[in-house]
Protein backbone atom coordinates (compact mmCIF):
# COMPACT_ATOMS: atom_id res chain seq x y z
CA UNK A 1 0.00 0.00 0.00
CA UNK A 2 1.14 3.51 -0.76
CA UNK A 3 0.13 6.44 1.42
CA UNK A 4 0.57 9.96 0.09
CA UNK A 5 0.52 12.80 2.61
CA UNK A 6 -0.35 15.99 0.74
CA UNK A 7 -0.18 19.42 2.30
CA UNK A 8 -2.81 21.93 1.24
CA UNK A 9 -1.83 24.65 -1.23
CA UNK A 10 -0.94 28.26 -0.44
CA UNK A 11 -3.78 29.83 1.56
CA UNK A 12 -4.81 33.31 2.57
CA UNK A 13 -3.06 34.73 5.63
CA UNK A 14 -4.72 34.41 9.01
CA UNK A 15 -6.89 37.35 10.02
CA UNK A 16 -4.92 39.11 12.79
CA UNK A 17 -8.11 40.85 14.00
CA UNK A 18 -10.34 37.76 14.20
CA UNK A 19 -12.10 37.36 17.53
CA UNK A 20 -12.37 33.59 17.12
CA UNK A 21 -8.92 32.60 15.82
CA UNK A 22 -9.80 28.91 15.41
CA UNK A 23 -12.97 29.54 13.40
CA UNK A 24 -11.15 32.15 11.31
CA UNK A 25 -8.31 29.71 10.59
CA UNK A 26 -10.75 27.00 9.52
CA UNK A 27 -12.23 29.34 6.88
CA UNK A 28 -8.94 30.31 5.22
CA UNK A 29 -9.10 29.46 1.51
CA UNK A 30 -6.54 28.85 -1.21
CA UNK A 31 -5.14 31.90 -2.94
CA UNK A 32 -5.17 32.18 -6.72
CA UNK A 33 -1.50 31.15 -6.73
CA UNK A 34 -2.27 28.29 -4.33
CA UNK A 35 -4.98 26.96 -6.68
CA UNK A 36 -2.66 27.28 -9.69
CA UNK A 37 0.17 25.37 -8.00
CA UNK A 38 -2.13 22.59 -6.78
CA UNK A 39 -3.50 22.23 -10.32
CA UNK A 40 0.06 22.04 -11.67
CA UNK A 41 0.95 19.38 -9.09
CA UNK A 42 -2.20 17.46 -10.09
CA UNK A 43 -1.20 17.70 -13.77
CA UNK A 44 2.24 16.26 -12.95
CA UNK A 45 0.71 13.43 -10.93
CA UNK A 46 -1.49 12.58 -13.91
CA UNK A 47 1.58 12.50 -16.18
CA UNK A 48 3.28 10.22 -13.66
CA UNK A 49 0.17 8.00 -13.78
CA UNK A 50 -0.52 8.39 -10.08
CA UNK A 51 -4.09 7.62 -9.12
CA UNK A 52 -5.60 7.37 -5.65
CA UNK A 53 -8.22 4.80 -4.65
CA UNK A 54 -9.36 7.27 -2.02
CA UNK A 55 -8.59 10.82 -0.90
CA UNK A 56 -9.28 11.70 2.73
CA UNK A 57 -9.10 15.38 3.66
CA UNK A 58 -9.16 17.69 6.60
CA UNK A 59 -12.47 19.58 6.78
CA UNK A 60 -10.69 22.96 6.81
CA UNK A 61 -11.50 25.00 3.71
CA UNK A 62 -7.96 25.17 2.27
CA UNK A 63 -7.43 21.41 2.60
CA UNK A 64 -10.87 20.61 1.21
CA UNK A 65 -10.23 22.92 -1.77
CA UNK A 66 -6.91 21.16 -2.39
CA UNK A 67 -8.61 17.75 -2.26
CA UNK A 68 -11.40 18.97 -4.55
CA UNK A 69 -8.81 20.11 -7.12
CA UNK A 70 -7.22 16.65 -7.03
CA UNK A 71 -10.67 15.14 -7.50
CA UNK A 72 -11.53 17.58 -10.32
CA UNK A 73 -8.36 16.43 -12.09
CA UNK A 74 -9.59 12.84 -11.81
CA UNK A 75 -6.82 11.63 -9.52
CA UNK A 76 -9.54 9.80 -7.58
CA UNK A 77 -13.25 9.23 -7.71
CA UNK A 78 -13.70 9.00 -3.94
CA UNK A 79 -13.37 11.70 -1.30
CA UNK A 80 -13.96 11.51 2.44
CA UNK A 81 -13.49 14.01 5.27
CA UNK A 82 -11.81 13.19 8.57
CA UNK A 83 -11.80 15.43 11.64
CA UNK A 84 -8.50 13.78 12.64
CA UNK A 85 -6.78 15.50 9.71
CA UNK A 86 -7.44 18.93 11.26
CA UNK A 87 -4.39 20.59 12.85
CA UNK A 88 -5.65 19.33 16.24
CA UNK A 89 -5.95 15.72 15.03
CA UNK A 90 -3.66 12.88 16.01
CA UNK A 91 -2.37 9.78 14.29
CA UNK A 92 -3.47 7.09 16.78
CA UNK A 93 -7.05 8.39 16.64
CA UNK A 94 -6.94 8.49 12.83
CA UNK A 95 -5.57 4.93 12.71
CA UNK A 96 -8.46 3.77 14.92
CA UNK A 97 -10.87 5.54 12.57
CA UNK A 98 -9.18 3.88 9.58
CA UNK A 99 -9.27 0.40 11.14
CA UNK A 100 -12.96 0.81 12.11
CA UNK A 101 -14.08 1.47 8.52
CA UNK A 102 -16.85 -0.71 7.16
CA UNK A 103 -14.94 -1.02 3.86
CA UNK A 104 -12.01 -3.41 3.99
CA UNK A 105 -8.94 -1.10 4.10
CA UNK A 106 -6.80 -3.78 2.46
CA UNK A 107 -8.67 -3.15 -0.81
CA UNK A 108 -7.04 0.30 -0.98
CA UNK A 109 -3.57 0.31 -2.52
CA UNK A 110 -3.11 4.07 -3.06
CA UNK A 111 -4.42 6.42 -0.37
CA UNK A 112 -3.99 10.20 -0.18
CA UNK A 113 -4.42 12.26 2.98
CA UNK A 114 -4.74 16.02 2.54
CA UNK A 115 -3.92 18.02 5.63
CA UNK A 116 -1.68 20.45 7.45
CA UNK A 117 1.74 20.99 8.95
CA UNK A 118 3.29 20.05 11.24
CA UNK A 119 0.91 17.07 11.48
CA UNK A 120 1.71 15.46 8.14
CA UNK A 121 5.50 15.59 8.60
CA UNK A 122 5.15 14.27 12.13
CA UNK A 123 2.83 11.50 10.98
CA UNK A 124 5.34 10.52 8.29
CA UNK A 125 8.10 10.34 10.90
CA UNK A 126 5.89 8.22 13.17
CA UNK A 127 5.07 5.86 10.32
CA UNK A 128 8.74 5.52 9.30
CA UNK A 129 10.76 5.90 12.52
CA UNK A 130 8.15 5.21 15.20
CA UNK A 131 8.80 8.61 16.76
CA UNK A 132 8.67 12.30 15.91
CA UNK A 133 12.10 13.69 15.04
CA UNK A 134 11.02 17.10 13.68
CA UNK A 135 13.34 16.66 10.70
CA UNK A 136 10.92 16.39 7.77
CA UNK A 137 9.37 19.55 6.38
CA UNK A 138 6.49 19.41 3.93
CA UNK A 139 6.01 22.52 1.82
CA UNK A 140 2.55 23.79 0.85
CA UNK A 141 1.35 21.64 -2.04
CA UNK A 142 4.12 19.11 -1.32
CA UNK A 143 3.86 15.34 -1.03
CA UNK A 144 5.37 12.68 1.20
CA UNK A 145 5.05 9.15 -0.18
CA UNK A 146 5.18 6.13 2.12
CA UNK A 147 5.09 2.43 1.30
CA UNK A 148 3.60 -0.17 3.64
CA UNK A 149 3.85 -3.93 3.31
CA UNK A 150 0.71 -6.06 3.37
CA UNK A 151 -1.61 -3.03 3.03
CA UNK A 152 -1.42 -2.49 6.79
CA UNK A 153 -0.90 1.04 8.09
CA UNK A 154 1.05 0.86 11.34
CA UNK A 155 3.48 3.10 13.21
CA UNK A 156 7.14 2.31 12.55
CA UNK A 157 6.47 0.11 9.51
CA UNK A 158 6.67 2.43 6.51
CA UNK A 159 9.37 3.02 3.96
CA UNK A 160 9.85 6.64 2.84
CA UNK A 161 9.47 6.69 -0.95
CA UNK A 162 9.44 10.40 -1.68
CA UNK A 163 9.47 13.85 -0.16
CA UNK A 164 8.61 16.31 -2.90
CA UNK A 165 8.23 20.03 -2.74
CA UNK A 166 5.88 21.42 -5.41
CA UNK A 167 8.79 23.01 -7.27
CA UNK A 168 9.99 19.51 -8.23
CA UNK A 169 6.55 18.64 -9.57
CA UNK A 170 5.71 21.77 -11.58
Image (tube, rainbow, N blue to C red):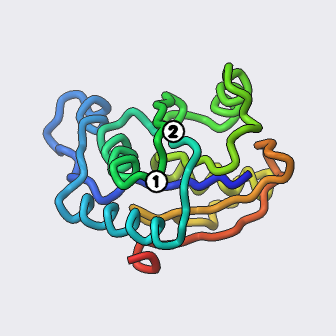
- Which residue is located at x 44 percent, y 66 percent? 139
Quarter residue 159 falls in: bottom right
Name the side, left or right, on which 141 lies relative to 96: left
**Residue 72 picture location, percent across and down:** 33, 49
For this rendering, which residue is in front, 96 or 151?
Answer: 151
Q: Is residue 126 visible?
A: yes
Name the side, left or right, on which 137 lies relative to 106: left
In this rendering, the count of numbered labels is 2
What element does badge 2 sit on? Answer: strand
Q: Is residue 87 visible?
A: no
For this rendering, which residue is in front, 147 or 140?
Answer: 147
Q: Determine whether 56 is above or below 41 in the image.
A: above
Number of residues whose C-alpha sits closer than 10 Å to that of mark 1, classed few (under 14), some (14–19) or many (20 or more): many
Quarter residue 40 falls in: bottom left
Residue at which label 1 appears: 75
In the rendered image, which quarter contains the C terminus? bottom left
Name the side, left or right, on which 132 lies relative to 66: right
Residue at which label 2 appears: 56
**Residue 79 picture location, percent across and down:** 46, 36
- Which residue is located at x 68 percent, y 19 percent? 102
| C-alpha distance separating marks 1 and 2 | 12 Å
- Which residue is located at x 52 percent, y 63 percent? 143
Quarter residue 163 falls in: bottom right
- Which residue is located at x 43 percent, y 71 percent? 44
Instruction: Kindly report which numbered mark, 1 or 2, lies closer to the viewer in this rendering.
Output: 1
Number of residues whose C-alpha sits closer than 10 Å to that of mark 2, classed few (under 14), some (14–19) or many (20 or more): many
Amino acid sequence: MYLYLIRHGIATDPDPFAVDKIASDELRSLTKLGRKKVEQVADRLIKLEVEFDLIITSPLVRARQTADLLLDNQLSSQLEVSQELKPSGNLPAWLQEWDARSIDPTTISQLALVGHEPNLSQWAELFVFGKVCDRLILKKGGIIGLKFEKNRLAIGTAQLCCLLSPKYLI
